[in-house]
Each structure stands twice: as structure tokens, then as C-alpha cells.
Image: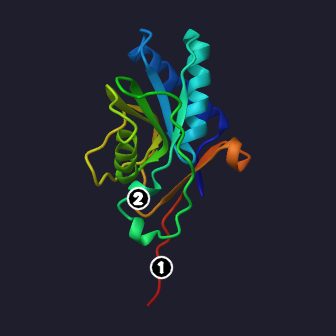
């Protein structure tokens, strides 16, 4: 494993993204953070705390489960669903969708489909802790904590204090078989 971010680097990245959100949305407006289950939710909560510390705005935080909207649902028949929680009406709001790792873009597409079932936001933006490239869909993040170049077969794992007991990002390199 190669450690790409330790706790201090992760903290700086989240703080930087919070500043970028505040700079882009300085006026009081219906702004909401919606974290994608599972690790996007605590990242969204951390962003909300940072934003409140920057300009004293309390931003509502929601959670969205994309299990039923995935395009690989047939391959994942036993996917564990968790409840979505949208704290207020999203019609006309600016939604910042939050996830831990942006890879192919397919999870983001599923999250967009799921969000639209709750209403019609004015804008949906995307904030990710890690952008590792290798898109399969035309999706890009508006806010990125860190770009990490990877090989397509590498595994990028985000560990969070809330769920894993530590904050770090590790890249596990693709193992090349040397069979005959």
C-alpha cells in the first residue's frame, strides 16, 4: 500500500474544499450538502462544520443511498441499502453532492438520478475528496480535495475516523500475475 494522504493532509483538503464552496456561494442561498452513502456522508458533515467556521452559515446535510439507481444492480443482488435523508425541500436549492472517490463516474450518475426523485434543484455540484481519473461517463468534480493518478486496476481506499478509526487514503497497486 502506498499512503497518499494522512490525517493532516485530509484535513487540509477538506478545509480547502470548504473555502472553495464558500467563495463560489457567498450569498445566503438555499445551499445543501448531500453525502453519498457511505463515506460521502461524514465528509459532507465535516465540510458543513468547516463552512460554519468560515462564515457562520449552518448548512443542512443530507445523505443519499444510490443502491437502487446503480447500473450494475443485477450484479449486486444483495446490496445493503441504507436510508436516504434529505433534510429539506431541494426545489430551487444549490446541492453539493459529496463523495469520497471519483473514478468512472457511474456512482455519481446514479446519485444524480436518486436526487432528482426528491425535487428539482437549481444546481447540482460535485465535491470529492479524491479524483483518481479513468472516467467512463462525462462527469467532472467542481471541488477536488486531491487528484491521485492511478492505474485502472489499483484500489483507492478512504479510511475515515467515524467508520474506520483513522483518517487516511491508501492506494493499493494492481497485482500483476506472473503465471505461466
The residue drawn where x is 35% and y is 31% is: 124
- Mark 2: give few (<14), some (14-19) or many (20+) Cα within 10 Å: some
Quadrant of the rendering where the C terminus is positioned: bottom left
The residue drawn where x is 52% and y is 64% is: 79
Report which residue position mark 2 lands on: 151
Q: Marks 1 and 2, Cα distance to the nearest angstrom?
A: 15 Å
Q: What element does badge 1 sit on?
A: loop
Q: Is residue 100 above or below residue 78?
A: above
Q: Is residue 13 visible?
A: no
Q: Is residue 176 above or below residue 132?
A: below
Q: Nearer the viewer, residue 93 or 103?
A: 93
Q: What element does badge 2 sit on?
A: loop
Disc marking residue 99: none
Residue 126 placement (x, y as % from top left):
39, 35
Please state if 138 lies on the left or on the right of 75 as rendered.
left
Disc marking residue 177: 1
Residue 150 placement (x, y as % from top left):
43, 53
The residue drawn where x is 34% and y is 48% is: 109
- Mark 1: give few (<14), some (14-19) or many (20+) Cα within 10 Å: few
Amino acid at each position: 500500500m502506498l499512503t497518499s494522504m494522512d490525517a493532516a493532509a485530509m484535513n487540509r483538503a477538506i478545509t480547502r474544499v470548504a473555502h472553495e464552496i464558500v467563495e463560489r456561494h457567498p450569498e445566503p442561498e438555499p445551499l445543501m450538502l448531500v453525502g453519498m452513502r457511505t463515506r460521502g456522508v461524514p465528509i459532507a458533515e465535516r465540510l458543513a462544520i468547516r463552512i460554519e467556521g468560515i462564515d457562520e452559515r449552518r448548512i443542512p446535510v443530507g445523505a443519499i443511498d444510490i443502491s437502487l439507481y446503480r447500473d450494475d444492480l443485477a450484479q449486486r443482488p444483495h446490496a445493503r441499502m441504507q436510508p436516504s435523508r434529505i433534510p429539506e425541500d431541494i426545489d430551487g436549492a444549490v446541492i453539493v453532492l459529496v463523495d469520497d472517490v471519483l473514478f468512472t463516474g457511474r456512482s455519481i450518475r446514479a446519485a444524480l438520478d436518486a436526487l432528482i426523485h426528491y425535487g428539482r434543484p437549481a444546481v447540482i455540484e460535485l465535491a470529492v475528496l479524491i479524483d483518481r481519473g479513468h472516467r467512463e461517463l462525462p462527469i467532472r468534480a467542481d471541488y477536488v480535495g486531491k487528484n491521485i493518478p492511478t492505474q485502472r486496476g489499483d484500489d483507492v481506499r478512504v479510511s475515515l475516523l467515524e467508520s474506520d478509526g483513522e483518517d487516511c487514503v491508501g492506494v493499493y497497486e494492481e497485482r500483476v500475475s506472473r503465471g505461466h
